[in-house]
Image (tube, rainbow, N blue to C red):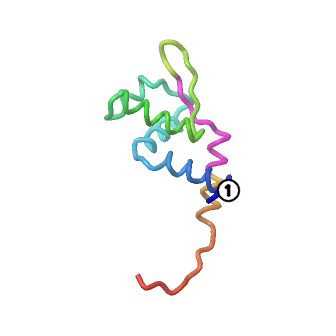
């Protein structure tokens, strides 16, 4: 089965938002211009390796971007992609759901 670009992008965003730690990371980044991964590790109750995996998922979706400043990595929200994600999710949730008889 082939999926549309909109379906694929919506699923990518939904997956990135599917874990409470990722939501917390986005809230941290949204409350300031940028944040170093080491500083986030001190704010979150997870191992650095776990944080790295969550940051990877958010980057994969394009919601955040990172800048390597050895030995640190600075992250911030990708504002353009954030707006695109918002439009995708609004469009998805604004689709009319037909009311049909369902025997559930």
Q: Residue at x 53, y 28 (%)?
A: 75
Residue 34, picture quadrant: top right
Give 53 or 77, whichever is nearer the viewer. 53
Give 29 or 69, whichever is nearer the viewer. 69
Q: Position of residue 40 (x, y in %)?
A: 42, 29
Query: Residue beneath label 1, please?
Result: 4
Q: Which contiguous range is marked in magenta?
A: 74-85
Relative to 95, does residue 40 appear above or below in the rendering? above
Relative to 62, does residue 104 appear above or below in the rendering? below
- Is residue 101 found left or right of 21 in the rendered image? right
- Is residue 56 found left or right of 90 in the rendered image? left
The quarter of the image holding the C terminus is bottom left
Number of numbered markers: 1
The quarter of the image holding the N terminus is bottom right
Q: Residue at x 57, y 41 (%)?
A: 61
Q: Position of residue 44 (x, y in %)?
A: 36, 34
């Amino acid at each position: 089965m082939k999926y549309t670009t909109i379906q694929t992008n919506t699923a990518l965003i939904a997956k990135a938002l599917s874990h409470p730690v990722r939501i917390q990371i986005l809230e941290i980044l949204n409350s300031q211009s940028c944040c170093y991964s080491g500083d986030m590790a001190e704010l979150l109750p997870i191992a650095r390796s776990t944080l790295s995996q969550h940051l990877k998922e958010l980057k994969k979706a394009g919601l955040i971007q990172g800048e390597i400043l050895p030995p640190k990595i600075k992250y911030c929200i990708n504002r353009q992609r954030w707006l695109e994600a918002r439009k995708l999710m609004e469009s998805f949730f604004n689709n009319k759901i037909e009311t049909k008889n369902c025997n559930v």
